Amino acid sequence: MSRFKQVSDLVMSLEGDFEKFYDKGNQAAGTRVRKGMQELKNLGQEIRIEVQEVKNKG
């Protein structure tokens, strides 16, 4: 469950920047959102690979 916690923490850490970008139009917050989403994508890919490896082991 530590991987789930990592995903959850990452998403929650972006909440403020999402609000600043979408509600207030802060462009710098948009950059941080994009960076965070890229990290989320990379983390998701790592988790997918781990799950596949565990599944294939039996």
Image (cartoon, rainbow, N blue to C red):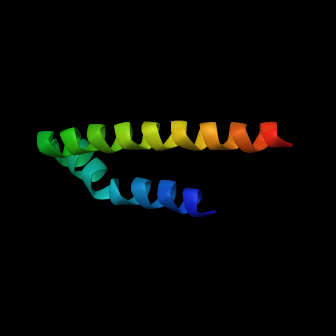
In-front residue for pair 24/31 = 31
Q: Residue at x 44, y 38 (%)?
A: 42
The residue sitting at the front extreme is: 57
Query: Which of the 4 image quadrants contains residue 38?
Result: top left
Q: Position of residue 34 (x, y in %)?
A: 28, 37
The residue sitting at the right extreme is: 58
Q: Could you tell me which quadrant the C terminus lies in?
A: top right
In-front residue for pair 49/16 = 49
Whether residue 51 is situated above or below residue 12 in the rendered picture: above
Q: Could you tell me which quadrant the N terminus lies in?
A: bottom right
In-front residue for pair 1/50 = 50
Query: Which of the 4 image quadrants contains residue 4?
Result: bottom right
Query: Which of the 4 image quadrants contains residue 13?
Result: bottom left
Q: Position of residue 57 (x, y in %)?
A: 81, 41
Whether residue 51 sits left or right of residue 7 in the image: it is right
Q: Position of residue 10 (x, y in %)?
A: 41, 55
Q: Residue at x 57, y 63 (%)?
A: 2
Q: Position of residue 44 (x, y in %)?
A: 52, 41
Q: Residue at x 62, y 38 (%)?
A: 48
Q: Residue at x 22, y 45 (%)?
A: 32
Whether residue 15 sits left or right of residue 9 in the image: it is left
